[in-house]
Amino acid sequence: MELAKISTGAAIVTLIAAVGMPGAVSAQQAEMSFFVTSVGSGKGADLGGLAGADAHCQSLAQAAGAKLTNWRAYLSTTAPGGTAGVNARERIGQGPWRNAKGVVIATNVDELHSEANKISKQTALSEKGEVIPGRGDAVNIHDMLTGSDPAGNYSTAGGDTTCANWTSSAEGSAIVGHHDRIGLKDTRHMKSWNSSHGSAGCSQDKLKSTGGAGLFYCFAAN
């Protein structure tokens, strides 16, 4: 009889532990401060401007159970007439930033924009903690919208580098980075997480044609 009680108790403990496992994942997601959007706006690079992109980050983070609330899209903008644009690096707080599995991808802004950052296909996870497909997968969507140069500033390359400051789904182009740090030609730029090349256009189809889906990085600036 006592043996039966012990066996039953052990089974209950095992069951509780098994049920508790998802809770541990949720706890990590609650502390999350960095992710790649699992879905884009559905309108290519038209994100509704910076405000719309930030709101998209906030919505996805909230749905995933994140506790932090001041979410910012890692996007730069340009301004006409030579006026300075908005720099992505200045929008995202000071760090450190953790993914949905609790891995620190950078401790501060300078580290994030150095070779010391930990961004890779294995760490640049969605808000759900899922790996985003990259080069070599059946579907490659490693292009992340940024509109930025390698230092995280707005581009001075000339022409449209932000799809009309994230309001166009037609004409234009946007600078993208590779979350998996891999490119068709394995050059320095193709290994960049935030500034690899320009997109073929701003529509969803044009983004797909060069390995994208309108996804972008989100950081908690809390």
Image: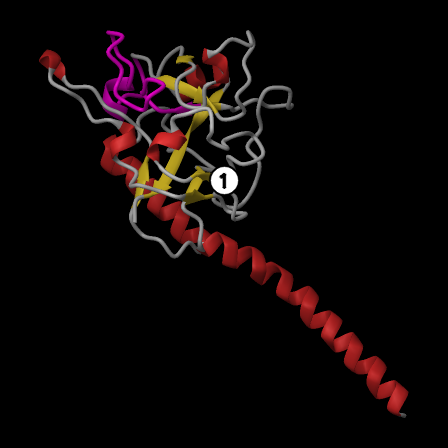
Residue at image coords 39%, 53%: 62
**Left or right of 24 in this view: 61:** left
At which x and y percent is residue 114? 41, 25
**Left or right of 78 in this view: 53:** right
At which x and y percent is residue 19? 66, 66
Find residue 216 and report its image quarter.
top left
Residue at image coords 57%, 24%: 134
**Left or right of 212 in this view: 4:** right
On screen, 84 above or below 41? Answer: above
At which x and y percent is residue 35? 45, 40
On screen, 170 above or below 127? Answer: above
Q: Nearer the viewer, residue 56 or 98?
A: 98
Q: Which residues are magenta?
A: 144-171
Q: Quadrant of the N terminus?
A: bottom right
Can you see residue 167?
A: no
Mark 1, other Cα within 10 Å: few <14 / some 14–19 / many ≥20: many
Query: Is residue 42 inside the magenta stretch?
Result: no
State the residue position of label 1: 126
Find residue 21 and report its image quarter.
bottom right
The total number of labels drawn is 1
Colour convention: secondary structure
Query: Is residue 165 inside the magenta stretch?
Result: yes
Find residue 41 and report its image quarter.
top left
Per the image, label 1 sits on a secondary structure element best described as: loop
Mark 1: which amino acid? Ser
Can you see residue 100?
A: yes
Mostly what secondary structure, the magenta segment? loop
